[in-house]
Image (cartoon, helix red, strand yellow):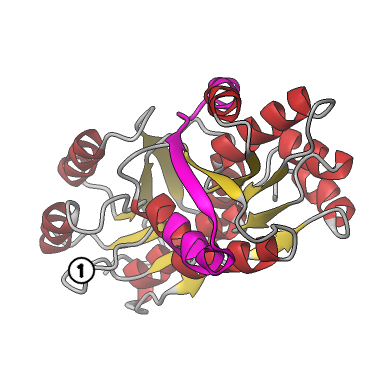
Amino acid sequence: MKTENETLKFVFITNCVNEDFYNPVKKGVHDASRLIDVKADFIGTEEVDIDQQIEMVDNAIKQGYDGIALSITHPTKFNAVIEKALKHGIPVVGFNIDSNDPSNKRLSCICQNVYEAGKILGREAMKYIPEKSRLLFTLHSVGVSALDDRLRGAQEVLSNKNIISQVVVTGIEPMKASSIILKALKEDEQINAIICTGQADTEGAGIAANILKKDKDYFVAGFDLSAKIIQFIEEGIIRFTIDQQPYVQGFYPVLQLALYCRYGIIPSNMDAGATIIDRNNIKTLIRAHQKGYR
């Protein structure tokens, strides 16, 4: 156990590290670190690369960090390296994406209940999507358990509408995502709704729907916030998005790791929430977004 006078050093390790989604996470890390006088690095892979992410955790163990916050992008593949960290006396907490494997030894996770969030999206979308609609579901990356679980939740709910659907993978760049979505829409002109599972594909769907708005009014809904997603919600291009409060996913892991290292207080799971953001409440979020909290 560290004394209060010793400076603690933590590292956050994630995938898609440069995605805009992580800007509020990084602010949360910075604010909490300054508040309780610890140091924290934020690193990760450019794309979804589980092997590289595991290697980063392994290097963090070798470098002697006092604690690790990890986005657990695969339910089982991180188990061994997490257990290795714990055996070296380095606590590991999850953030943003958790493992649903009971043998995973991470101490806690601060994240959205992604499957339930997918169902929330599906239930809200049901209000606007007619029976037997043709839907386009999108994932920005393959192999990310959180995206798969959101998709599963939304599909489960919307199956009650007897929908016909397909799934496309868009990549993590919104402009590239929009071109892939546009291609899918042109190949099947009967599609009338786009349901997304992450920030990049939600923004990309908004770009695509905005390009085609003179010809057809698409229903678009998805996850997370960005300046462009906010703009599209204000303009009615995106009907709504599901927010997972990324700021708290950076802030609370720092506190949990510090309390554990200094006082032995055991970390506990926290649900980051699944709030529906639409034109009715978007203006209340704009100032917080501009300040980096949302």
| Quadrant holding the N terminus | bottom left
- What percent of the width, then of the height, locates residue 120? 60, 68
Residue 160 belongs to magenta span: yes
Residue at image coords 60%, 29%? 185
Can the viewer see residue 283 in this picture? Answer: yes
| Near-viewer residue (94 or 149) | 149
126 shown above or below 265? above
- What percent of the width, then of the height, locates residue 144? 35, 47
Residue at image coords 81%, 29%? 213
12 shown above or below 123? above
Can the viewer see residue 7 in this picture? Answer: no
Q: In this rendering, would 115 be left or right of 55?
A: right
Q: Which residues are magenta?
A: 151-179
- What percent of the width, then of the height, locates residue 4? 41, 66
Residue at image coords 37%, 79%? 265
| Near-viewer residue (67 or 219) | 219
Instruction: Give the structural element (helix, strand or loop) at label 1.
Output: loop
Residue at image coords 48%, 73%? 270
Q: In this rendering, would 147 be left or right of 282?
A: left
**Mark 1 Cα within 10 Å, few/some/many (few <14, many 20+)?**
many
124 shown above or below 137? below
- What percent of the width, then of the height, locates residue 3? 34, 67
200 shown above or below 156? above
| Near-viewer residue (157 or 148) | 157
Indicate the amino acid at tag 1. Lys
Query: What residue would you read off at disc 1?
Result: 105
Name the image quarter holding residue 181. Answer: top right
Q: In this rendering, would 247 be left or right of 147?
A: right
